[in-house]
Amino acid sequence: MDKKLRPSIFKRMLALFVDFLILGIIGYISGLFFEDFYVSLGKYGTLLGSTITIVYFSILQSSIGNGQTIGKKTIGAKVTDLKGGYLTLEKSFLRSFIVFFPIMNVQLFSGGNKMLIIVMLLVLTIMASVYFILVNKSRRCLHDILVASIVTKQDVTDIEIDEQNDRSTMKLIPLGLIVILMIGMGIYQTFTENTISQLLAAKEKIENKNGVIAVNEVKSSTTTYTSTNKPSRTYSSIQISVRIDDKNEASNIESKYFEDIYEIVKNEIPASQEMDGVTMTLYYGYNIGIASKTQSVTKTIEKGND
């Protein structure tokens, strides 16, 4: 496909930015009225945000919206099928679902020992889309190939697509090798790395505590500090971010949650007792994917001060 007939990758990214800016404004305004409801959704809030996003893109990129979201109108682009006709609502929904549902809900489905594998699959999905954009002259992403759609400039009526070339098996071989390699690495790390399995065990135990909505992050890190006048120093720590359902506790540096979380870390991650510190952050608020509002308090327990 002639590159003069399709928007550049930069313009497509700009359109996506405009659309999510609009969705963010919608999320922010609705949060002013439904904050308590959004908080009550807990970790399932992203399901609401992804639903709003999918509905927005499904309707506007179908025949109902002439294949154009507000962002695509801004850059003068549209989504059509391979014959230049607008997508049906069903096809547009499938296209939007493939793009946004996995990305916006990865944390929701990444608990326990399957976390690394799911994250790997998400990364692979993104890589596949980028890969197809780069190797296909039509610049069609993975979701475009799956639902037989294309993004063109809004005044284009005649489209010539080498569909067989876009779906070429030869193009899938490098991607397939990367997929096998990354999934293998994810499985190996998940079931053989002791530290990772301990972090996941701690995450699961913390999430089972009353009042805990979700563990947003749990990781071990090592930072080396260097100075021209002093010898380099290494600081090792466990870092945990926990979302809770009590607004007052999320601003209380003496919160009971800190002690409980620290005990779990010590029991589930023995190496933490040899580290320089454990940093814990308590969050209260909501995250619906297109908007979020939180307050937080952070406490670090240094080695020898527990």
Image (cartoon, rainbow, N blue to C red):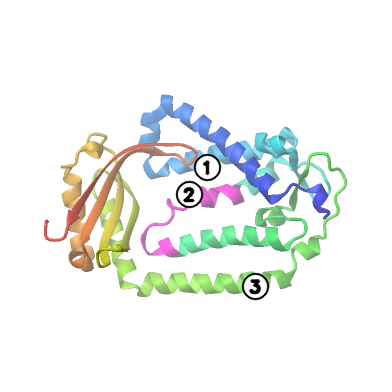
Residue for point 21% across, 65% down: 275
Q: Nearer the viewer, mark 2 or mark 3?
A: 3
Please tell me whether residue 148 is drawn above or below residue 285 in the rendered image.
below
Which residue position is annotated with label 2? 105
Q: Quadrant of the C terminus?
A: bottom left
Q: In this view, does 132 lie to the left or right of 277?
A: right
- The image quarter containing residue 153 is top right
Q: Does the magenta stretch include residue 101?
A: yes
The circle drawn on residue 174 is: 3
Report whether 236 appears left or right of 5. left
Residue matched to label 1: 50
Determine crowd level at label 2: few under 14, some 14-19, many 20+ residues with C-alpha closer than 10 A: many
Please say if the residues under marks 2 and 1 sit with CB atoms less than 8 Å apart: yes
Could you tell me the amino acid type at mark 3?
A: Pro
The reply to whether residue 208 is visible in this rendering is no
Look at label 2 and name its amino acid: Asn
Q: In this view, does 3 lie above or below 77?
A: below
Which portion, as a residue range, is magenta? 97-116
Give the alpha-carbon distance from disc 2 to disc 1, as whole Å.
8 Å
- Earlier-in-chain disc, 1 versus 3: 1
Q: Which mark is residue 8?
A: none
Q: Which of marks 1 and 3 is in front?
A: 3
Which residue appears at 31% of the width and 50% of the height?
241
Q: What residue type is labelled 1?
A: Ser
Where residue 178 sits, quadrant-wise, is bottom right
> What is the distance, in whole Å, between disc 1 and disc 3 at their CAs?
31 Å
Q: What residue occupies the far top of the structure in this picture? A: 33
Q: In which quarter of the image is the N terminus?
A: bottom right
Q: What kind of element bears circle 3?
A: helix
Residue at the (39%, 31%) spot, across then down: 37
Q: Which of marks 2 and 1 is nearer the N terminus?
A: 1
